[in-house]
Image (cartoon, rainbow, N blue to C red):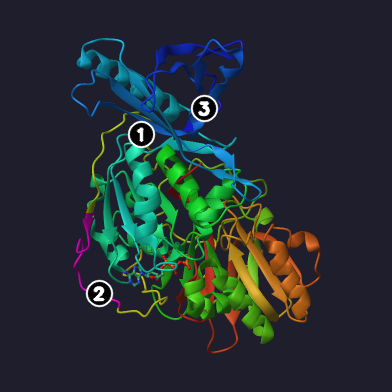
Amino acid sequence: MDQKRDEPNPSYRNGISQVLLYGEFTTKASRKVRYAVSLTERDLTVQKITSAPAGRSKVVFNLRDCVGCRAVKADDNTDVGAYFTAYFYPFKKRWMSSGIARQRTEQCFRVASSLDPHLNLEEAQRWARAISEGSAHQRPQRNGVLYSEVHRPCKVLLLLNPHSGKGQALSLFTGHVQRMLHEAGIPHTLVVTERQNHARELVREADLSKWDALVIMSGDGLLFEVVNGLMEREDWEEAIQTPLGILPGGSGNALAASIHHYAGSQPVSSEELLLSCAFLLCKGLVSRLDLTSVCLGSGPQQRLFSFLSLAWGFVADVDIESEKYRHVGAARFTVGTLVRLASLRVYQGKLAYLPAETGHRSPSSGSSPTTSGSLTEVSVSSPQSEASSSTPSFCSSLVCHSSQQSPNTFHNYCNSNNAFKAKRGDVAPTTGPSGPPDSLLVPLDQPVPSNWTVVPEENFVLVLAMYQSHLAEDLMAAPNSTMEDGLIHLLYVKAGISRATLLRLFLAMEKGAHVATNSPHLVYEKVRALRLEPYSAKGTITVDGELVDYGPVQAQVHVGLARLIAS
Ligand SMILES: Nc1ncnc2c1ncn2[C@@H]1O[C@H](COP(=O)(O)OP(=O)(O)OP(=O)(O)O)[C@@H](O)[C@H]1O
């Protein structure tokens, strides 16, 4: 069941947290110094026991920052003691630079109150269980967001693209993520993708009942494959509810940067962003995620599902052209932007959209509130019945901490033929109609409905539709966007803008301040659906950063259709 947050916590009396466990322990490093350790629903407090008042410093660890706690018996058979270790990832000031980021710290205590090693291990396990359960209840959450939780113990299928970003995803995984998953007691199976569309085929055929979450470690392109693979299944309605997770291993990492931003955290990049997303993954809170269906006019049944963006013009060109600067990582977009600025182009076409204030939210998610205003849905013949509003909800939490399992790595997990043989970035068409009907769209060969706005300009520098906040780690194109706002944040820049002003817009976008620059060339609209008809025969359109067939395109947002592990 989805749970609303902010329920009263019975363990607080008059705002004071009750002590659940208290003990005095030594550490692994020294058996001479003793610590008083107390656990409440909210914190683990550690205080050195000493006669000198100056030495009695108290350190409080918030269980919200804890991913788990493990108990073990001593390695040394002559030691009757047992140990419990709690793993925290609090925000700390960076060394040698400003700002804060999550940093790992562990607290390990030796339990030796008995001469019987079994009793000591039992006591250590009691502490480990209590700390783990406490940390599972203390999660970073945002007001007004509907959550459910990943099944515990959860089985994660982790798909990793070894070529994403600078080609270091596997070493980033083993260096930063694997240990945290072990600390959180999350067993996982790692599949290293072998080629484009490997992940798409795999999730299209997989027995999803074996997995509680599908996590990708790559850029946004691999998640795009997974989303579309799920939507191509006959049981798409159930399949797309599998909680998805993202660990940034690419160069853009837009969705990862967005979920980090939604968590209210200060901007970070690279390994710090990875640590932040891995932390959110371990916490296992599942939110709804809007998907936008994108219909391409270039052929029948060309329908894709997108979680991030649709771009035409400057942004799409930079995305594809900057592929050759991949070796510089996230900086490839900066280099690409400067190169394209030098040869700034005008793109001609027709743009139309359904403004959000006139359209009600599409019915994909039955429990989502509708916005004010009214709109008669455009009825179109649909190959599939309306998406059910009684989609099964996730089970509520069963907090349990599983033991470590080493990940099984399957390089040949799916050996099906590469049906698409697409070059990097080309998106294979869907195999057939699936997904909810696009009730706001009419066929591309018909004029847009009368309640749509047709943009009078036909000369553009860029058109960018965003459904998450970030376009890249350091580009906050739609700062007001949330995971399930049922909105497409449409930005377009009209021709006539100078290079210097366009550069200023992109620099301001780093902090999401581009709209506030009030440039007369930049237009920002919240919409529910849009249509774009380029006049040129050749060009670049990207969906979630992936190249799609060029030509007329239209799109409609479906509220909360997917599930994402975030905060
Ligand atoms: N093993 C593989 N070999 C080649 N291509 C792959 C493989 N696995 C996935 N792909 C494809 O590589 C493309 C790029 O993947 P992805 O977007 O995840 O990484 P990226 O481009 O480095 O990241 P970003 O989009 O953040 O720049 C996608 O089209 C994906 O389908």
**Dominant secondary structure, magenta:** loop
As rendered, which of 34 and 365 lies closer to the eye? 34
Residue denoted by label 3: 61
Q: Is residue 413 left or right of residue 308?
A: left
Question: Regarding ligand 1, which quadrant of the image does it lie in?
Answer: bottom left
Residue denoted by label 2: 418
Looking at the rendering, which quadrant does residue 120 occupy? top left
As rendered, which of 399 and 354 lies closer to the eye? 399
Cβ(mark 1) to ligand 1 < 8 Å?
no
Residue denoted by label 1: 395
- Tell me the amino acid under the disc marked 3: Phe
Question: Quick one: SS at disc 2?
Answer: loop
As rendered, which of 271 and 542 lies closer to the eye? 271
- Tell me the amino acid under the disc marked 2: Asn
Q: Residues within 10 Å of mark 1 (few under 14, many from 20)?
A: few
Residue 532 against residue 174 in the figure, above or below: below
The residues colored magenta run: 409-420
Asked whether disc 1 touches disc 2, contact meaning CB atoms under 8 Å apart, the reply is no
Q: Is residue 427 left or right of residue 380?
A: left
